[in-house]
Amino acid sequence: QRSEAEVVMISVSSYACQRRTSLINHNAVLTDALSLLPHNAELNEDEGRGLAFRRAAAVLKFLPEPVTTTTPLRGLPCLGEHSLRVIEDILQDGASREVESTKRSERFKALKVLNGIFGVGVKTADRWIRAGIRYLQPLQGSGETLSRAQRAGLRYYDDLNQPVSRAEADAVGEIVEKAAVSVLPGARMTLIGGFRRGKLTGHDVDFLLTHPEEGREEGLMPKVVSRLESEGFLLYQKTTRNSYLESEDGPARSSSSMDRFQKCFSIFKLSRGEEGGAEQTGNGESLTPSGQEAWRAVRVDLVVSPVSQSAFALLGWTGSKLFEREMRRWARREKAMSLSSHALYDTRQRRYLRASSEEEIFALLGLEFIPPSERNA
Ligand code: GTP
Ligand code: MN
Ligand code: MN
């Protein structure tokens, strides 16, 4: 048993990108509670406070053992009075009154339901709640105009709120890779997002596509998408042309004439029980022997990057979101650099810094390399 004094000795950086955060969380009870509060804060347009709770939860995730009292926490970064009060309540009474009353509130329950619809952000959910819409059924009859994404989100609501397994992620990967290579020989696919960090389940599956020869990746996204579409794998897709151009006078700038970095937010139709063997049923009506539908809907994100930017894309899309955010904060505040999923710009030298691997990007930022499995902040 470690004494309190020893716990204090652990030095904890205030930047999540300087901490190794594995998937093992010794303080899940506390972090689960704290992670409810950002939603509430952000809903009330308090982004800063929301981020403060996320940072506090991330520090607890990093600790090597369960917290039993708040005393040793007082010396740690990112744990403000509000977070400490919540932690203290849970340690003393088994629950935090603020968290429990949030969970019970109609507003929060409605937010969870509505925000669980693909294509619905907190702002839209908030507007609907104000209009008295709290569940899916009333929404459908409300006369609210729904976007194409939201209509798909409603149609596949149950499936999309079921976690995606690693086996399902791999099955999607096989399908995507096959499609990519068939429309562009030599194309390369990498699993990114939470699964790259070692997570066993995810809310979606994320892939990065590139080609070792610069420029060959141009136009890859529409080709992959129409290939997947013709094979009947896509229930929904929206491709965005993410235009990006390096410029002499600053970092990430856009140009409509140069669309090389593209994203596709999609919903896949994935056969059940065929994880690992990427085969297609073709017939959506059939049932498996256990009476389940023969396929399920899975959210899939695709990104295409030119190889010259692929290290930045890989780093930027591996997450976690907080880890990425903290890396950009570190770059800006400590190094006067601007980091994006495309490039690293040095403000003092007024130039872009090249990198062909994640390791190089960490080194350019003066950070110790943290592997994906330890970016679970
Ligand atoms: P689960 O999907 O819930 O398992 O977690 P995840 O970490 O994979 O989350 P998500 O798929 O939402 O995002 C993966 C990474 O991609 C995160 O680091 C995000 O910051 C990044 N990301 C997501 N959407 C965008 C986007 O529109 N643009 C950019 N540049 N990055 C994004
Ligand atoms: Mn993901
Ligand atoms: Mn995603």
Image: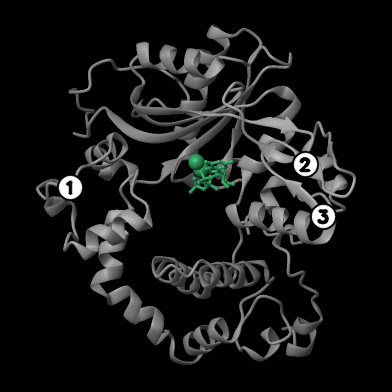
Q: Which residue is mark 3?
A: 336
Task: Give the answer, above or below, for where 337 lies relative to 301.
Answer: below
Which type of secondary structure does the marked residue at label 1 adopt? loop
First in residue order: circle 3 vs circle 2? 3
Q: Quadrant of residue 213?
A: top right
What's under tag 3, amino acid-wise? Ala
Instruction: State which quadrant residue 356 falls in.
Output: top right
Give the residue at mark 2. Answer: 344
- Front position in the image: 309 or 258: 258
Q: Residue at x 27, y 75 (%)?
A: 105
Q: Residue furthest left?
A: 141
Residue found 38% across the figure and 27% down from its top: 237
Q: Amino acid at mark 1?
A: Glu
Q: Secondary structure at mark 2?
A: strand
Callout 3: CB less than 8 Å from ligand 1: no
Residue 67 as seen in the image, left or right of residue 289: right
Q: Where residue 36 sits in the image (x, y, percent)? A: 43, 69
Q: Amino acid at mark 2?
A: Leu
State if disc 2 and disc 3 touch (CB < 8 Å).
Answer: no
Residue 50, image x and y in percent?
Answer: 51, 69
Which residue has dot 1 on it? 144
- Label 2 and label 1: CA atoms lie apart by 42 Å
Task: Say which residue appears at 68% left-offset and 23% top-offset.
Answer: 306
**Disc 2 to disc 1: CB gap under 8 Å:** no
Say whether disc 2 or disc 1 marks the residue closer to the N-terminus.
1
Give the vertical position of 336 relative to 200 (above or below). below
Which is nearer the N-term, disc 3 or disc 1? 1
Q: Is residue 38 visible?
A: yes
Identify the image quadrant of the N terminus: bottom right
Residue 272 in picture, x, y percent from top left: 33, 29
User: Within 10 angstroms of label 1, few (less than 14), some, or many (20 or more) residues?
Assistant: few
